[in-house]
Amino acid sequence: MVLFAAAIPAFGAKTAGWLQACCDTADFRFTKFPGRAAGEELRIRISSHGANWMIYRFLNDWWGTLGGGKVTGERCNQAGECEKTTKSDLQVQKVTMRRMFGKYVVDINGQHLEGQFVVKYRKRDPKCICE
């Protein structure tokens, strides 16, 4: 029983939210993260420059370091006011039918945030149409 209790924190992500992907972009919205103020959201966007967004091809690579895409971020409050990150990077480690797991690094306004995340897929409405 002690072994099981000690292993629980290793699997829990302190950062959580949702993900929407369409064509060449993926939007990660973290609604729960360390140091979060009420109603605040951390947003990270990956753009792959015209190619369809295929996460399986880049498992365990850091997207911002990889150079195959652009990673941008911002922290937004309830009023919709956002401040851009000076550094954003994201690493996807595991993908299931409903969730994605990985690590993130963000520098914003002199604050450094990093950790593990879990996001749930969210369907786009209206549906995504890629040309």
Image (cartoon, helix red, strand yellow):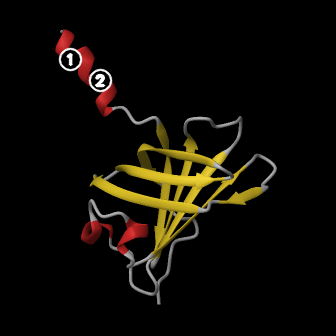
Q: Which residue is located at x 26 percent, y 67 percent?
A: 56
Read off the residue under disc 2.
Answer: 8
Extreme-right residue of the structure: 79
- Marks 2,1: beta carbons within 8 A: yes
Q: Which residue is located at x 42 percent, y 45 percent?
A: 117
Q: Which residue is located at x 44 percent, y 48 percent?
A: 119
- Residue 32: horizontal and vertical position, in percent? 56, 38
Read off the residue under disc 1.
Answer: 4
Count the marks: 2
Secondary structure of the residue carrying tag 1 is helix
- Residue 99: horizontal and vertical position, in percent? 36, 49
- Residue 113: horizontal and vertical position, in percent? 53, 45
Left or right of residue 60: residue 65:
right
Query: 125 and 39: which one is in front?
Result: 39
**Placement of 4 over or under 32, stated as above or below:** above
Q: CA distance from mark 2 to mark 1?
A: 7 Å
